[in-house]
Amino acid sequence: MSDITSIDRETIIKILAKNLHIVKVCAKLGPKSDQDNALVRVYIVLSVKQFLVSKHITVLEHPPCSQDLDPYDFKLVIKEENALKKTLFQSVGDGKIKTADLLKMVTTNEPQNCFEMWKTRMQQCIDR
């Protein structure tokens, strides 16, 4: 950032910390408190909504983090992810081979079953 603004790094850090209440966390800049974090999220949501309105994009409103809207295809991915957890591979190629093998084990019925379960869940949401 200092090379773009021609302001030295220490001054930028002071401005971020004192004026904007942003601190360095895990090599990333972020808000100091949960309240600040919530305000940042609200600002981002509002700016995204304004952008979508400006492009005449209709948005379906729904509660945030609704498990009813959780796509079932993630259930397939989770199975493969759990099988790969804590596995050390000698190379990226070995990891790709193991991942491909796991994906080949997914039966043709599993995605269809996930889709049917998702449709059932959506219908339950509509019926409420």
Image: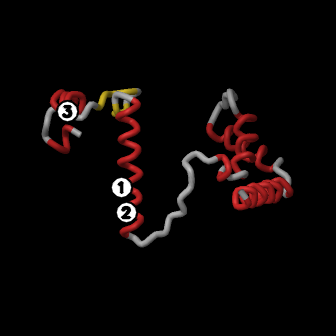
Q: State the SS at label 3.
A: helix
**Crowd band around label 2 with a 10 angstrom C-alpha radius: few (<14), some (14–19), many (20+):** few
Determine whether label 2 and label 3 are within 8 Å by CB: no
Give how far across and how far down residue 57 sits, in percent.
Answer: 46, 69
Residue on which disc 2 sits: 51
Q: CA distance from mark 2 to mark 1?
A: 6 Å
**Crowd band around label 1 with a 10 angstrom C-alpha radius: few (<14), some (14–19), many (20+):** few
- Front in this rendered view, residue 90 or 1: 1
Can the viewer see residue 9 in this picture?
A: no
Q: Which mark is residue 24?
A: none
Q: Which mark is residue 19?
A: 3
Give how far across and how far down residue 29 sits, in percent.
Answer: 34, 33
Q: Residue at x 49, y 69 (%)?
A: 58
Q: CA distance from mark 1 to mark 3?
A: 22 Å
Can the viewer see residue 68 in this picture?
A: yes
Q: Residue at x 23, y 40 (%)?
A: 1
Figure check: 83 above or below 52: above
Residue on which disc 1 sits: 47
Kind of residue at disc 1: Ser
Q: State the SS at label 1.
A: helix
Figure check: 15 above or below 54: above
**Crowd band around label 3 with a 10 angstrom C-alpha radius: few (<14), some (14–19), many (20+):** few
Q: Residue at x 50, y 64 (%)?
A: 59
Name the image quarter holding the C terminus.
Answer: bottom right
Determine whether label 2 and label 1 are within 8 Å by CB: yes
Q: State the SS at label 2.
A: helix
Kind of residue at disc 3: Asn
